[in-house]
Image (spheres, coloured by chain):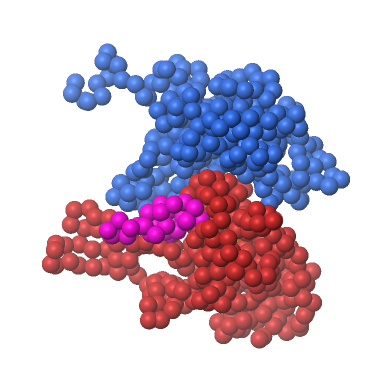
Amino acid sequence: MTDRQAALRDIAAGLLGGGQFATFIGFRAGLDPSRPVPHFVRDASGAGALVINPFCGAGLARHVLEALEDGPVGILTRGCDGLGLERLIADGRVARERLHIVAVACRGAVDPARARAILGRIPERAEVDAQAVTLIAGEERRSVPRDSCLLSRCLNCVDPSPRLADSWLDEPLPAGVRDFKAVSHMEQQPPEARYAFWARQFRRCIRCYACRNVCPACSCRSCSLDDPELQERATSLADQFGFQFTRAYHVAGRCVACGECQRACPMSIPLSLLNEKFLKDIRDSFGIADPHRPSAVEPLACYRPDDPESWRGDAR
Amino acid sequence: MTMNLLPSERLAEFRECLAAGARLYGPVEVDGIVLFEELGGRPPAIRPGNPANSLKSFLCPQTEAVFDFEGGYTDVALRVPAAPTAQAIFGVRPCDAVALERVSRVLLAEPFADESYRQRREMTTILTMACREAGPHCFCRSVGVSPADGRGSDVVLYPADGHYLLEAVTARGLSVLQSAGAFLDPARDEAARATCQSTPVPLIGAVEREDLAARLEAVALHPHWDELARRCLGCGACTFLCPTCYCFALFDTVRGARGRRSRGWDSCQFKDYSLMAGGHDPLPTKASRIRRRFLHKLSRFPAVQGEYACVGCGRCGGTCPVGLHLAGVLSELEEVLR
Ligand code: SF4
Ligand code: SF4
Ligand code: SF4
Ligand code: SF4
């Protein structure tokens, strides 16, 4: 753990000291020890503030968009950050050669709210391994199952290490295969139950669009959601469904399942479940085993002249 | 003001009596999170700290119709929505009630009182549950609010073992106690209030500073605002959930010859929030918008109103996806100034 942190600080200091890189993106300690915050190091002497620990939960990929305006960027990158960077690169928003990717293998990030609920106070440290999470505060150490306090995206994670890397802080962990268990379960519910479930979720949306602002697949410079003629801002249930479907469809086929939308949502709406539905359908309809990983063939993003269905509808 | 004791086992009857003449709202747990919603007979989820949404949802709703219109250029017919009906909100925390008092200073200021807010405020009864335990991100006391504060409330309930001490703060509160007289015991329990007055509040150390406003103004141009801007997503969740943020925008949706003028929450954290006709934007960068949020709450609003436009409810602390909340930012600024 500390080895990785020391290595990270060295690499960041080296990149910034070399003069080619303007920013290094990682984490620094927050006011609350269980909530480190994204941090933007601007010169070599600042690298000592960087931390790596199991509370580092925020996704970092989306932050490169703004940081690149100042020059090339070094970035601490877990599997989910890596997929986000791949997305931005595939969408032509970021040039690979302007990034230095410092890869780290991730065993999961702790959800600070769930951890606090378990411990009854704010945890100061945590240790995460393949079996369990140990939460530590003062003299107290408590081991709990992973699914009781990790972020939900981490429980479904099959990409602990990034696929793109310029430096490694440790050995990569092997990738897995998504099982879509939660979506399959949802698909078996009767339509009325599914409707009731989503109505209950969407009803509480405050339309802050944090889900959009963190998303590496939502990187348009100007967004239809900001135009009241295109997306009514009213919050009737019909408007809420309209907005939620718009968001989900706009990332369908490009969502990398990084789970940032759900983590950022202040109303705890399970957005990942919607995204997963699209991913599962892409897997089943197009036979792509890992539809969340950006690739040369993205079925919802390409057009083939020999497509059996005419998109213009002129075969009517 | 009038004080009474309510035995804990009669709390549900007390609530029923409130629900008799008004829609009754309160905190409920929905899918693991606590929200203010219409109670509809559900037991309230009274937990340390605050529900995710604030009372704003019921007094200045997220969006509401100002009027519907129909017709051509010269013969427009307007339809205004029905006047609001009575509502009571139970289980409010003292900071949220104080926040209403702060918002009212702005929205009810003559000669431009906000008619829609005024009508709703007049139809709303606030029943506050004083805090015996604070939430993880609370810092009320360092912004001049107490866990036993009665400002903005009609009735305050101070929890004690086996009963609640009820205090009527307003004439409306007094009539609530009168109508619930059958459940109440005229005994007093001063200790119940004193206990809440001394409830420990976790984050006060991060905020409590002498000359907070002057210190902030002194760092208004510090480069740390740029660092904060790199981190901030500009989503405005902090302001949408903040009980003291009251900005709104008007927008029209037109469908053929019919349409609706609505108003809805706006946020100083949004790009183009302050964009003027002619193209000038006094808050053109994210750094300038974040700075504005902090200076407004802790320096400019107090300069005019004599109180902070933050009540220490802790919502921004629990919800900002990148940990850029009031207590956190103040402690960072202290750190960079050291
Ligand atoms: S982040 Fe959550 S509350 Fe905000 S717009 Fe998205 S779904 Fe709605
Ligand atoms: S939609 Fe959500 S899970 Fe998918 S890429 Fe965007 S933030 Fe990540
Ligand atoms: S401070 Fe946090 S909640 Fe507020 S706009 Fe920035 S990212 Fe969103
Ligand atoms: S600024 Fe934060 S702590 Fe203060 S009243 Fe608003 S949400 Fe609550």
Using the rendered view, name the quadrant where residue B76 is placed: bottom left
Can you tell which chain is drawn blue?
A
Q: Residue furthest right?
A: A139
Q: Which residue is drawn at 70% across and 81% down?
A: B4
Quadrant (top left, top right, bottom left, bottom right) of the C terminus of chain B: bottom right
Between B61 and A166, the one lying in front of the other is: A166
Task: Give the overall secondary structure of the magenta segment.
Answer: loop
Task: Check if residue B288 falls in the magenta segment.
Answer: yes
Residue B289 pos. (x, y %): 47, 56
Rendered position, A303 above or below B48: above
Residue B155 pos. (x, y %): 62, 77
Rendered position, B94 above or below A218: below
Between A278 and B225, the one lying in front of the other is: B225
Rendered position, A35 above or below A133: below
Q: Can residue B332 be seen in this view?
A: yes
Extent of the magenta region = B264-290
Residue B71 pos. (x, y %): 16, 62
Q: Which residue is drawn at 45% across and 47% down?
A: A209
Q: How many labels does the image show?
A: 0
Residue B313 pos. (x, y %): 62, 62
Quadrant (top left, top right, bottom left, bottom right) of the N terminus of chain B: bottom right
Q: Which residue is drawn at 68% across and 41% down?
A: A49
Rendered position, B168 above or below A299: below
Question: Relative to residue A64, is residue B176 drawn left or right?
Answer: right
Shade representing chain B? red
Task: Check if residue A35 falls in the magenta segment.
Answer: no
Q: Can residue B39 be seen in this view?
A: no
Between A267 and A38, the one lying in front of the other is: A38
Question: Relative to residue B175, is residue B277 drawn left or right?
Answer: left
